[in-house]
Image (cartoon, grey):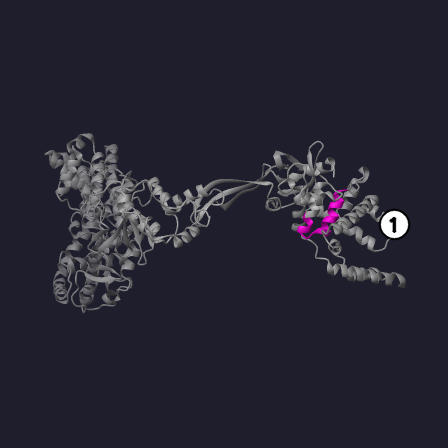
């Protein structure tokens, strides 16, 4: 073999395995040299042996080695294209050749004359001469392949699709007897060959074989474009005559690339990119990036990119990095699995070390300083010096399974060297972080609740988190929460002082010493911080008038960093989180009712239904009971149910129990004084006149409301609520004697109110103050106002109505001043309304002070708009602001 013969094969050596020294053929090259074909085509034919597709590939490679047998005369191109559609395959132009071959073979098997075959070729625009050349080359290749031992005669046989033995026999029905006998012999011969031949090769088998020789002609479609990018940065288009021209699959393989006006790919097929790597592993290059430890896989992995002459075949896939870069993988394993503890390793040394590290981190979370735990580099160096560079079995130290195997077989001394000491992990002793300063539990009358510490600014759980069972949510004292824990209160106090005006802040210098003195004075940690801190500042300055310069509302509105407030995590009995946040009132609004219902679960032993007489013994103020491991305190009281019956219920707060018990006692006393209550409804003086003047309230509603108001005052009034049978009976006696006087007094007050109301409504008409006064009036006179109005306010209620009349009379003289005063009142009234609504949403009773503030606002209206009517005590906007500060703090 001369150099001219070797040259084309050597030129194609990139598609072969690792080439040998210059001008020496490999065994594969020697086989290729025996085939009378282009080296690329020869390589394909040899790959067909491996992929069991020799029969199909002989047809295809012989077609690729001759001129295309399809004809497309310019004058009848459309007719030719339509005729060729009979053979077209939508996925592969290579399979189109198989379809042409199969169709031609079927016609030949019909024993047509040469003239008939030529006519058939002309009908489908096929060149009969090229078809004969194709068959001749095919026959030659079959003989060569069989001679070379690449395939047996049977393995080169291809049964055309859709041509069964039955169909072949049918074709012979119209033949004469002699021809039929010959056809029968031929059918048997073909049948035997068909049985011995394998099934037709699959799409994948055929195109994997094609890839081995045509790998330089692969391409990927560019997004949002019609062209393809190929190897070495080339760009090409699909030839318009290709069956794939319209579909343009993502990846294609071409028989050849020819350049005319553009670079075109001819005879193309759709392929999968992973076939490229699998068929030509010696040609692709591997690139690795983003190596990292992956906890889920338990090993160091990297992203791998596969390229073929610069063309990206696979953009990214995760692979084990240990086999690629064992030293770097070992370092990443130590940093990720052992230093960062991102693994589920159960080795004794690792569990021990994790526990110690957590203890040190807890110290940092409490002190809010990351200066205790040693640097990660020191911890890395600890493991790096003790773990082997390479394992005895030669495997890299890059995954948990390999590491665990090494641990099982290594000596005890080496294992023991992996255990850390707490002192090794700490940069200093952290003596200031004590149990007293940073307790593990928050203690209340209801028990102790777990505290969690975290130092991670901007994280939802930064600071200290209190785990609160839902059952005690309504009993949490918001003022107690303000004091956090001892180790964190100093920073909060310092920030609060910093928020004060400079002239006040100056009094506290030096601030650390002032805070120490304040904390040594043992402030009440169940009361708000701000009033006590303000008082301490004024006392320290020696001038109590300084308190007037401190605006508690403005001070309270100053927002401190999130870690200066308790983070509350509300959990159910199973420990599942229900809500989390730093606003107790908001959480109570959200879950308060659920908390009350949950509190009463499984407490039937303390409750009773349908009580008609006091036969429930003595009711204790509170009772203790267990809920799982938790000790709870509940409060008993009678309650009027929605159906009007009386029941004994357990409440989660004392305020709710007291409010319910008062109404429950009144309803139970009504049952004992049925006749007297009936007489109340009959003997109301001037009721018709009152009902007419208060006509916006229904007659029946007004009568029931009056009865309820008389009963509340006569039955209980200011007395303590009875909690045993003896006290209850004595209360019934007192109520019987009180009823006439209370009824008469209320009747008198109510008549006066009704008269003033009628005058006021008549005056309002189209007055400019109509809307404002109507809103005020609706808060004083409404359904159930008789029973809801405190007894001591009945004498003042007519005055409030008169003051509204006076205001209308004076309005025209100075409407601007009237508006300014109303704005001041509205600000106070809105704050009061929000507070009351919040309490109701939390299912909590409105405190006496909060309820009384409403009447203070009414007295302020008298003072501002009708001074001549006078008020029982001095009242002003400034005084009410001070009173409000006392309520909210």
Q: Is residue 256 above or below residue 172?
A: above
Left or right: where 445 falls relative to 571: left
Q: Secondary structure at mark 1?
A: helix
Q: Is residue 53 magenta?
A: yes
Question: Where is 535 relative to 472, above or below?
Answer: above
Q: Which part of the image, by quadrant, shows the C terminus?
A: top left
The reply, left or right, for residue 233 in relation to residue 634 is: right
Residue 739 vs residue 520, the one in the foreground: 520
Asked if the magenta segment contains residue 304, the reply would be no
Which residue sits at x=69%, y=32%? 262
Q: What residue is at 87 percent from the left and 50 percent from the top?
A: 116
Magenta region, residue range: 47-65
Between 180 and 562, the residue placed more toward the observer is 180
Q: Position of residue 363 (x, y in %)?
A: 26, 45
| Residue 362 pos. (x, y %) | 28, 46
Residue 673 in view, yes or no = yes
Q: Residue 155's image quarter?
A: bottom right
Above or below, 617 relative to 264: below
Could you say where residue 9 lies in the image, as x and y percent from the top left? Answer: 70, 39
- Asked if one can make out residue 164 in the rendered structure from this viewpoint, the answer is no
Reading the image, the residue beneath label 1 is: 114
Where residue 492 sits in the image (x, y, percent)? 22, 40
Looking at this view, name the residue that lies furthest to the left.
542
Q: How many marks?
A: 1
Neighbours of disc 1 within 10 Å: few (<14), some (14-19), many (20+): few
In this rendering, position of residue 379 left or right of residue 70: left
Q: Nearer the viewer, residue 647 or 183?
A: 183
């Amino acid at each position: 073999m001369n150099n001219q013969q070797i040259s084309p094969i050597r030129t194609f050596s990139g598609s072969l395995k690792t080439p040998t020294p210059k001008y020496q053929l490999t065994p594969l090259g020697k086989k290729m040299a025996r085939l009378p074909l282009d080296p690329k085509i020869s390589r394909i034919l040899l790959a067909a042996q491996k992929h069991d597709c020799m029969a199909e590939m002989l047809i295809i490679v012989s077609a690729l080695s001759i001129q295309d047998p399809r004809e497309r005369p310019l004058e009848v191109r459309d007719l030719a294209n339509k005729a060729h559609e009979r053979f077209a395959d939508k996925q592969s132009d290579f399979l189109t050749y198989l379809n042409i071959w199969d169709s031609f073979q079927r016609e030949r098997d019909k024993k047509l004359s040469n003239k008939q075959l030529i006519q058939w070729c002309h009908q489908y625009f096929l060149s009969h001469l090229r078809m004969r050349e194709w068959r001749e080359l095919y026959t030659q290749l079959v003989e060569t392949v069989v001679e070379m031992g690449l395939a047996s005669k049977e393995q080169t046989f291809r049964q055309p699709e859709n041509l069964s033995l039955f169909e072949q026999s049918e074709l012979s029905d119209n033949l004469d007897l002699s021809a039929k006998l010959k056809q029968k012999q031929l059918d048997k011969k073909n049948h035997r060959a068909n049985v011995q031949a394998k099934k037709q090769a699959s799409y994948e088998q055929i195109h994997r074989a094609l890839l081995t020789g045509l790998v330089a002609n692969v391409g990927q479609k560019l997004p949002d474009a019609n062209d393809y990018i190929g190897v070495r940065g080339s760009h090409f288009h699909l030839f318009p005559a290709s069956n794939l021209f319209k579909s343009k699959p993502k990846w294609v393989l071409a028989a050849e690339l020819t350049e005319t006006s553009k670079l075109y790919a001819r005879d193309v097929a759709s392929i999968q990119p992973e076939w490229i790597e699998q068929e030509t592993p010696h040609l692709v290059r591997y690139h690795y990036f983003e190596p990292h430890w992956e906890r889920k896989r338990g090993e160091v992995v990297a992203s791998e990119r596969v390229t073929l002459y610069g063309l990206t075949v696979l953009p990214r896939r995760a692979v084990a990095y240990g086999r690629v870069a064992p030293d770097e993988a070992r370092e990443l394993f130590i940093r990720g699995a052992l230093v960062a503890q991102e693994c589920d390793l159960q080795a004794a040394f690792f569990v021990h070390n994790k526990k110690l590290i957590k203890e040190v981190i807890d110290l940092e979370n409490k002190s809010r300083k990351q200066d205790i735990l040693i640097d990660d580099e020191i911890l890395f160096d600890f493991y790096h010096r003790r773990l082997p560079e390479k394992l005895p079995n030669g495997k890299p130290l890059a995954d948990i399974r390999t590491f665990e195997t090494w641990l099982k077989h290594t000596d005890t001394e080496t294992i023991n060297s992996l255990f850390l000491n707490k002192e090794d992990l700490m940069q200093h002793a952290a003596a200031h972080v004590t149990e007293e300063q940073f307790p593990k539990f928050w203690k209340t009358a209801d028990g102790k609740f777990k505290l969690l510490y975290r130092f991670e600014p901007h994280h939802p759980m930064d600071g200290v988190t209190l785990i609160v069972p839902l059952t005690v949510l309504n009993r949490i004292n918001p003022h107690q929460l303000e004091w956090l824990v001892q180790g964190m209160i100093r920073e909060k106090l310092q920030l609060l002082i910093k928020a004060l005006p400079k002239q006040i802040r100056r009094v506290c210098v030096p601030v650390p010493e002032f805070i120490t003195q304040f904390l040594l004075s043992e402030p009440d940690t169940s009361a708000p911080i701000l009033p006590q801190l303000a008082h301490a500042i004024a006392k320290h300055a020696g001038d109590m008038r300084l308190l007037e310069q401190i605006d508690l509302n403005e001070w309270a509105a100053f927002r401190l960093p999130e870690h200066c407030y308790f983070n509350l995590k509300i959990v159910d009995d199973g420990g599942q989180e229900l809500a989390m946040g730093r606003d107790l009132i908001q959480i109570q609004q959200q879950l308060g009712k659920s908390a009350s219902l949950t509190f009463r679960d499984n407490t039937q032993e303390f409750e009773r239904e349908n009580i008609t007489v006091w036969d429930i013994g003595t009711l204790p103020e509170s009772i203790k009971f267990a809920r799982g491991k938790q000790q709870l305190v509940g409060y008993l009281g009678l309650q009027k149910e929605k159906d009007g019956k009386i029941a004994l219920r357990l409440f989660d707060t004392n305020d709710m129990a007291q409010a319910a018990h008062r109404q429950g006692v009144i309803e139970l006393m009504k049952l004992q004084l049925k006749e007297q209550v009936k007489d109340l409804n009959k003997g109301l003086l001037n009721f018709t006149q009152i009902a007419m003047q208060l006509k916006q309230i229904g007659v029946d509603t007004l009568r029931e409301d009056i009865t309820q108001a008389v009963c509340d005052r006569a039955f209980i009034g200011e007395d303590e609520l009875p909690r045993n049978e003896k006290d209850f009976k004595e209360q019934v006696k007192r109520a019987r004697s009180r009823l006439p006087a209370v009824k008469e007094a209320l009747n008198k007050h109510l008549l006066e109110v009704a008269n003033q109301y009628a005058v006021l409504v008549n005056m309002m008409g189209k007055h400019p103050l109509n809307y404002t006064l109507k809103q005020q009036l609706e808060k004083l006179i409404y359904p159930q106002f008789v029973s809801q109005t405190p007894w001591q306010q009945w004498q003042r209620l007519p005055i409030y109505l008169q003051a509204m009349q006076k205001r209308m009379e004076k309005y025209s003289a100075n409407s601007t001043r009237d508006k300014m005063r109303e704005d001041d009142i509205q600000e106070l009234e809105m704050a009061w309304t929000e507070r009351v609504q919040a309490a109701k949403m939390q299912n909590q009773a409105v405190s006496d002070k909060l309820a009384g503030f409403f009447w203070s606002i009414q007295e302020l209206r008298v003072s501002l708009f009708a001074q001549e009517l006078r008020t029982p005590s001095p009242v002003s906007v400034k005084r009410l602001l001070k009173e409000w500060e006392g309520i909210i703090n």
